[in-house]
Amino acid sequence: MSGSENNGPRVGLIERYRDRLPFGVDDPVVSMAEGSTPIVYAPTLSQRVGAEVHLKLEGANPTGSFKDRGMTCAVSAAVRDGAQAVICASTGNTAASAAAYAGRAGLRCAVIVPEGKIATGKLAQALMHGARVIALRGNFDEALVLVRELVARHPIALVNSVNPFRIEGQKTASFEIAEDLGEIDALCIPVGNAGNVTAYWKGFTELGLAPRMFGFQAAGSAPLVNGAPVAKPETIASAIRIGNPARWEEAMTAFVGSSGMVREVTDSEILDAYRHLARHEGIFCEPSSAASVAGLLRYGPDGAARIVCVLTGHGLKDPQTALEQAGSVVPCEPEIDAVEAAVLA
Ligand SMILES: *Cc1c(COP(=O)(O)O)cnc(C)c1O
């Protein structure tokens, strides 16, 4: 059943794709009608790169990022298994999503985030949904090592993308692309912990499709490009500020198996793409998401005629970076001449 044939309320992805996911008809489902996100054609990007470019708007998921696709599955499985609590290490969006789905399921939730390195909106979400938010004086990689140790000691479900249910849920984005566009030549995607590129490749492979996977890492956090972990990853794109991806091997299998590539983009290229998308395509994504478009703009389509760039999260997640990158507001007295001058300037 596809979303467009459905006349009732929109269903979540477990219901939409249950025959291709590890859930039976009687299993509990924790869902907020995630998935079925828009794919929009990008005219200015298409013209700039000389190919047909579409954008997959994952910011349209319930908590504003693709993490909800994995989280509906991870939290539903945790409920089925009788878990009382979930935990994750997070650069922000996993925390927001885990907190929301755990809240809905009546589970306790703890999230461990790198102190001072998570966007304001994501922090607000995790706190509002009632998670215990722990600010680690360390980076994401250290947080992930510690939560893995903690779940070995306590019966708490780990909902990071090392959890196979996360990959299962996230692979459904490939199904949607195939249903909406048919075959594509390449997928451009930001790469952090490398769960998402692993999931997309799994989804395409299950369909017998093999578009080229073009992954992009931020230059200061590019372990897959360098072929070695980065001890102190740095980038303005906080969601991909990861130095030792958990899905390293699987991601490399996706790049090699699809005749794709993993390459780096600088923070300034990321911010250029971020502003271009907002100003000329009407689409406000977060900086990490813009890495997919930054990479396409820097390296070109490399022979691909039809391309999807994954915009992984919504721009409202990170209002601080937006305000630093955008123009300033115009102060004005409440008089017609002043307003006229201000508007027409
Ligand atoms: C999590 C995230 C990524 C990176 O995905 P991985 O699966 O860690 O590679 C990219 N962009 C955003 C907005 C994210 O939240």
Image (cartoon, rainbow, N blue to C red):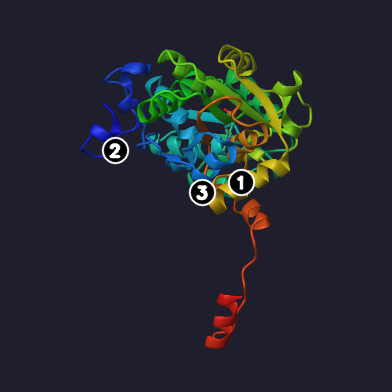
Query: Looking at numbered disc 2 in the image, what kind of residue is underneath it?
Result: Arg
Question: In what quadrant does ligand 1 lie?
Answer: top right
Name the residue at 56% across, 15% down. 258
Give the number of the disc on residue 274.
1
Q: Nearer the viewer, residue 244 or 47?
A: 47
Sequence-first disc among 3 and 2: 2
**Residue 163 seen in render:** no
Would residue 302 be found to the left or right of residue 131 on screen?
right
- In what element is the residue under mark 1? helix
Would residue 107 be found to the left or right of residue 229 on screen?
left
Kindly report the distance in space between the C-alpha atoms of the residues bearing marks 1 and 2. 30 Å
Sequence-first disc among 3 and 1: 1
Picture coordinates of residue 284 (x, y %)?
53, 49
Would residue 341 be found to the left or right of residue 210 on screen?
right
Sequence-first disc among 1 and 2: 2
Seen as rendered, the residue at the extreme right is 231
Query: Looking at numbered disc 1 in the image, what kind of residue is underneath it?
Result: Tyr
**Closer to viewer: mark 3 or mark 2:** 3
- In what element is the residue under mark 2? loop
